[in-house]
Image (cartoon, grey):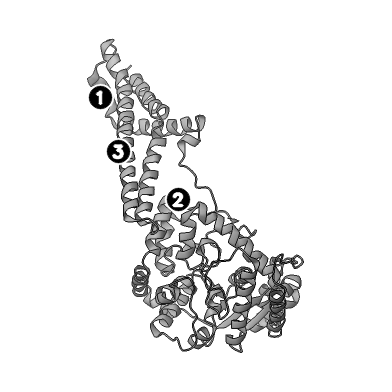
Amino acid sequence: MALAALVAGLVAFIAVLRGLAAQRHAYQVIKVAQEALGVITDPDLSDEAKEKRIQRASLSLLKRFFLLLSIGVVACLSATLFVVSGELLGFFSVGQAMAIATSGSFLLWSSVGAIALWILSGKLGSREAAKPENIHGEVPYSALDRALHNFVFASPDRQIALSAVEDRCWKRTLAETRLEKPVFVTSLPRAGTTILLELLARQEEFAAASYRNMPFTMSPLLWGRFSRLFRKAGAKAERAHGDGIAVDFDSPEAFEEMIWMAFWRERFQGQRIALWDARDRDAEFEDFLSRHMRKIVASVPNSRRYVSKNNANIARLPLLKAAFPEAKILIPIRDPASQITSLMRQHRRFTDLHARDRFARQYMEGIGHFEFGAALRPIAFPGAPESAEGAEHVDYWLRYWIAAYEHVLRSAPAETVFIDHGALSRAPDTQLPMLAEALGVEGQAAFIAASDMFRMPPPSPELSGASPNLVQRAGDLRAELLTRAL
């Protein structure tokens, strides 16, 4: 009878925890604590606002602590009731029950039974009550993820110091790593840079940064080793741009700009991003970026060449060539009407997203993506807009497109590889062999076989409300750019 009473007490204990939603309240404690950490690291909140939110979080945690304590007390009392009742009815003594309860066999089998009962009751009950709240939306990060990202973004010096630690830990590996002819893919956004990055990253000889490098993007080897302890598999899902491109944790992405921001902070001040030229050599920066490229290559087995996609690199073409003379610079050219239509669509999309989710803007600014939405900060090409003001109008983007590619024509080194995005999309079987030859790709058969990545582009759209003279200038400029294309 004592054994039966103990089993009944165990069942009652689990039933009370389930019935009073102990797990849901425990998850809420974790959620409040994570959100409080996010508040502390949020760069957009004033100290006064942080103090008020932390006070509210503290009260909420105190309240849930006493609630969980009460649930625990009720659960223990319900289990104790069966033992006390058995003694009062003369079925057994408390001493007999305690002797059984403290035996090794009972402790083992009661633990197994409690776990099984907990899982079974969870499946039979409300599943939503037994799970943490899911994070919905275009930026699927938990409060703890957001706090970690903001902590890292807040101090480039912290990232550089961590990278120095990595240098010492992987000194031999980096010394033995081959690094040959890197490729810098660049252009204004929506020109086809992402698909070119994915095309090259698929080739065995190339290595690119991936989403797994976030948020410690400057320490890919160190963070990669540590993050294996809790690495997620992750299915592919459409990225925040809503452009049909599916990504997962292993997809290549553009994180190189974080290094430029860390070493050239003054260039990112104000409402525009300043330009670079060949005279802006910096030995410390070039050494760091060279080591970073070597680390990315070391993190991808059998690779020898670094590849990056960085739209802002069109602001520093002469410097790239001077600093890395063996590098190949690849610039896709898209017809301005299609590209500007896409730029405006993305700007509207991200403006809406940033209004709803402040962290989405913080994330983009943290990784150096200033192309859209509330994060928009144009590059200071001669003749480009002075700020983000007016970006809702098509002429803003036309002026920006013209200024950017006029600068490209003036500053691109002679060896720069230009490719017509439209021609590549329409006839990849013809364009890919030429591109492989221009970039010096060794595995050309596999490169050319990737033609299924490309789709026939839609007809060029009308730019409603655009100034005819700007449309004409953009068309003429594109024609001139294409004279340098493959």
Residue type at mark 1 is Met
Q: Visible in this render: residue 468?
A: yes
Distance between the alpha carbons at the discs numbered 3 and 1 = 34 Å
Give left or right: position of 170 versus 329.
Answer: left
- Dot 2 amino acid type: Ser
What residue is pinned by disc 2? 142
According to the picture, the residue beneath numbered tag 1 turns out to be 98
Image quadrant of residue 482? bottom right
As drawn, the residue found furthest toward the top would be 89
329 relative to 67 in the view: left or right: right
Q: Quadrant of the N terminus?
A: top left
Q: Secondary structure at mark 2?
A: loop
- Quadrant housing residue 398: bottom right
Q: Is residue 274 above or below residue 373?
A: below
Residue tagged 3: 62
Report the Cα–Cα distance between label 3 and label 2.
Answer: 22 Å
- Residue type (three-letter) at the residue carrying disc 3: Leu
**Labels 3 and 1: the sequence-earlier one:** 3
Confirm or deny contact between disc 3 and disc 1 (CB under 8 A).
no
